[in-house]
Image: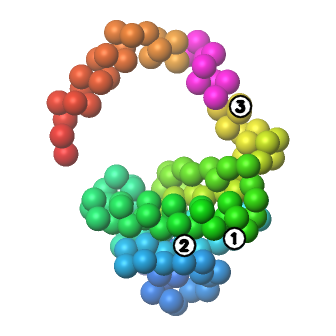
Amino acid sequence: MSEIPGVPCVFCEIVAGRAPAHRVDENDEALAILDTQPFAAGHTLVLSKRHVQWWDDLTENEAAAVFALAHRVAKRMRTALEPELVTLYARGRRIPHTHVFLVPTSKGDVLDRHFDELEKIQETSEDLAPLRRPASREEAARRIRRRPR
Ligand SMILES: [Zn+2]
């Protein structure tokens, strides 16, 4: 599947072995490959083996497998590449197949500067000010608690 009818999903093709990738590691439910457009040397994507767009639509076992593989690969990155930290995030909007980004990150590099800017917005944006109020946060917590999936 992909967002374009008739065009196979590139990550499904990689999982099936029909498209090339620099494979780093895998387990039963997840595969780690190098990103073709890295933010830093060793930038890795951890994919679910099953085609699922949003990571929170994975089964609990699949989510655990993706996170376990991300954890194992990040540990190796810390030793092999010696970044300050390994940034982890997931979106799934551009390629609609669950993938977690693992990016070796050091102070002042491209991704570090990006997240520094994002944190400034989070903490100072007037647009977000209403969400910082205790009553607003309590309402969000109440809504999340009463909506089990
Ligand atoms: Zn796919």
Q: CA distance from mark 3 to mark 2?
A: 28 Å
**Which x, y percent locates residue 40?**
76, 59
Residues 126 and 142: in front is 142
Q: Is residue 64 above or below residue 107?
A: below
**Residue at left 66%, top 56%?**
103
Q: Which residue is mark 3?
A: 117
Q: Residue at x 48, y 67 (%)?
A: 69
Residue 95 placed where, x, y %?
Answer: 52, 62
Q: Is mark 3 within 8 Å of ligand 1?
A: no
Asked which quadrant contains residue 64, the reply is bottom left
Residue 97 falls in which quadrant of the image? Answer: bottom left
Asked if one can make out residue 12 in the rendered structure from this viewpoint, the answer is no
Q: Which residue lies most toward the bottom here? A: 18
Q: Residues within 10 Å of mark 2 (few under 14, many from 20)?
A: many
Residue 4 screen position, x and y as percent: 47, 68
Q: Secondary structure at mark 2?
A: strand
Query: Which is closer to the viewer, label 3 or label 2?
Result: 2
The residue to which callout 1 is attached is: 36
Query: Viewer-nearest of labels 2 and 1?
Result: 2
Count neighbours of disc 1 (C-alpha within 10 A) and say few if under 14, some if 14 to 19, many if 20 or more. few
Q: What is the span of residues highlighted in magenta in the rendered image?
A: 119-127
Kind of residue at disc 2: Ala
- In three-dimensional space, the C-alpha distance between marks 1 and 3, rounded to whole angstroms, equals 25 Å
State the quadrant of the C terminus. top left
Q: Residue at image x 48%, y 56%?
A: 92
Dot 1 falls on a residue whose secondary structure is loop
Q: Note whether 139 is above or below 15 in the view shown.
A: above
Q: Is residue 109 left or right of residue 121?
A: right
